[in-house]
Amino acid sequence: MPSSETAPLFEPPQGALALPDATLTLTPDFIADADRTALFATLRTTLPWQRQPIVLFGKPVMQPRLLCWMGDPDAVYTYSGRTQQPLPWTADLNALRQRLQTVLGTPFNSVLANCYRDGRDSMGWHADNEPELGPAPVIASITLGATRRFLLRHRQRGLRHRLALSDGSLLVMAGSTQQHWQHAVPKTTLPVGERINLTFRYVTPRRR
């Protein structure tokens, strides 16, 4: 189980990232070092990972990573042309949710878990701006396992920014970030281990 200790969000060298039209906060060691390996192993071996087809440029393709959608029963989410029906919370993911709600002071009713098996697995450019997330969603993104590049690009200004999201880190995207910025996890030819990414969010509840 994750440590019950909470990490402060706004103290150097971590804290708010100075990007225009964005509210971004990075906490490198949100998950205690002693908890990371066991939590990664539990999630990797117990979550019902799957690959799903998505529509890309009008054609169905398989997503280049494993994923799992979990949450409250009414946290139904549609993205990339697919409607995700939530699976029940596991004890570990619910404990992380409760900790995030306490630290950030905002509710979360769902989590999208992604598993990047090696450098060939990736996430294309996108914004978390689906209608059920609302106009200013809070996305809390936890990384476990290998460090991967996380790219950001401004939709109007042509600005770009790069982060290295490491094991145990928490990146929070809030405010108008999703309106103005897209993000991606690109492929890499470098040797890299497995990475699990947990993105907690609140979706407008609806019936199945």
Image (cartoon, rainbow, N blue to C red):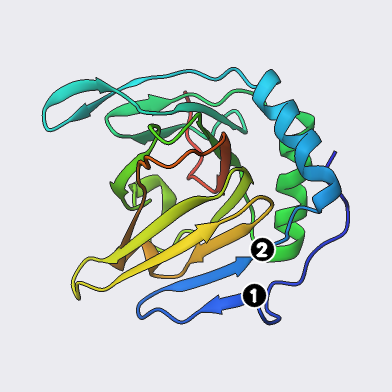
Check the picture and name the quadrant holding the N terminus.
top right
Q: In which image quadrant can residue 43 be found?
A: top right
Seen as rendered, the residue at the extreme left is 58
24 and 73: which one is in front?
24
Residue 87 rendering spot, x and y as whole percentages: 59, 23
Horizontal side, residue 56 vs residue 147: left or right: left
Query: Can residue 142 be seen from the camera position used here?
Result: yes
Residue at image coords 77%, 38%: 37
Q: Is residue 129 above or below residue 78?
A: below
Up-down: is 174 above or below 122? below
Residue that label 1 marks: 14
Residue 149 at x, y percent in the picture: 44, 54
Q: Quadrant of residue 195?
A: top right
- The relative height of residue 143 versus residue 137 in the rendered view (above or below) is above
> Which residue is rendered at x = 43% and y = 28% of the image?
65
Q: Is residue 138 visible?
A: no
Q: Residues within 10 Å of mark 2 (few under 14, many from 20)?
A: many
Question: What residue does disc 2 label?
Answer: 28
Which residue appears at 33% of the width and 53% of the height? 127
